[in-house]
Image (cartoon, grey):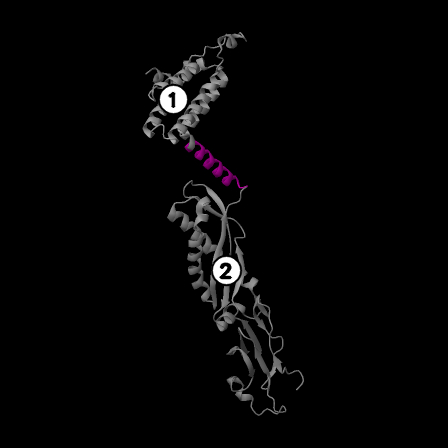
Amino acid sequence: MAGVIDLVKWDGSPQLLAWKHPSQELSTWTQLIVNESQEAFVVRGGVYDGPFGAGRHTLSTENLPGLRGLIGLPFGGKSPFTAEVWFVNRVTNLDVRWGTPDAIQLQDPRYHVMVPVRAFGQYGVRIADSKRFLLKLVGTVPGFDVTTLNEYFRGIFITRIKTEIANAIVRQGQSILEVSTQLEGLSASLKQSLTTEMSDYGVALSQFNIHSINVPEDDPAVMTLKAALAKRAEMGIVGYSYQQERSFNVMETAAGNEGSAASLMGAGMGLGMGLGMGPSMGQAYGQMATQVQLAPKDSGDPGAAARRGEGTSSTASADDRIRLLRELAGLKAEGILTADEFDAEKRRILAGPGAAAA
């Protein structure tokens, strides 16, 4: 009979998960060829007959019960009928890429600033229930590939990924800048969560990996946060606090306005240094402190400083404090000073001239 297809088969691309044969003109003599890792369904009147596994199948009333009413129709030993033939690719595809299309805005739990977060990764899928997959996802489209599947699940993925990342940083109290150390645990947690979601559509999630969680380097909030962390690390190495750093800034500003260390002393901000570190070390620091504190103010004579052999400015007072603190921190790191001795000397440096006198 003209127009009736004698052979139906599909040699499809690995990226194509489901495919509908273009012709619906079949007969009870049509041969259906199903390759390994494929399944096929014959759909007539909304009824799915199958699945047909790997091998050669004759579309007869034995495997298509809905055709029994066609027996005896005089078409040269063939009983033509109209039906769709669907093939489902059950090969595991391990190279499905995913990524957040836009940055996810999350609040850093440690620093309480809103930071944009992006995540990227890869997952693997296979069709576990072909009939459910065709009914709930494929519908009436002629083909369904991996890209379409990825687009369909993107919204679910982004919601779950955002929730898991937020939960992880809250549980651990870590900064968003540190969450990348938890990629393996986050991947496992997300795989478990998404497996249940995708199984409702007949899709099995064979693997799920987060390759990276990062923040845009040029985002103003990120730049501010990283600059603050770098500053805190520097102060931690030197051994002084943010409040002390602010005090140094104030002294430097005042020094630029006043012009000498003597004026800073008059304002009660001169440098004091105790001698509790031992005779020789205390004497050395004491001499340095005395030179900074007692430098007389120039009277306008350009050669005065040179004649005195000193010339220490008030700007040096703030700088010397920082330099002394750094030297003390180095001595502490080398084990020459104990933590208590370091703290005591630091307090004397920051206390001012009164402490030095004591």
Viewer-proximal residue, 300 or 196? 300
Kind of residue at disc 1: Ile
Looking at the rendered image, the quarter that the N terminus falls into is bottom right
Q: Residue 82: in sight, yes or no?
A: no
Q: Is tag 1's residue or tag 2's residue first in the polypeptide sequence?
A: 2
Residue 48, compared with residue 14, is above or below; it is below
Residue 48, compared with residue 290, is above or below; it is below
**Looking at the image, which residue is at 53% across and 63% down?**
149
Graded by Cα atoms within 10 Å as few (under 14), some (14 to 19) or many (20 or more), the crowding at tag 1 reads many
Q: Nearer the viewer, mark 1 or mark 2?
A: 1
Q: Secondary structure at mark 2?
A: strand
Looking at the rendered image, the quarter that the C terminus falls into is top left
Expressed as whole percent of the image width and height from the top left, the position of residue 194 reads 45, 60
Tally of marks: 2
Expressed as whole percent of the image width and height from the top left, the position of residue 355 reads 34, 18
Q: Which residue is mark 1?
A: 349
Q: Which residue is mark 2?
A: 123
Q: Quadrant of residue 87?
A: bottom right
Viewer-proximal residue, 324 or 48? 324
Expressed as whole percent of the image width and height from the top left, the position of residue 164 reads 43, 53
Tell me the magenta residue range.
Answer: 218-236
Kind of residue at disc 2: Tyr
Left or right? Give the position of 341 relative to 21: left
Q: Badges 1 and 2: C-beta atoms under 8 Å apart?
A: no
Q: CA distance from mark 1 to mark 2?
A: 59 Å
Expressed as whole percent of the image width and height from the top left, the position of residue 222 reads 50, 41
Viewer-proximal residue, 230 or 104? 230
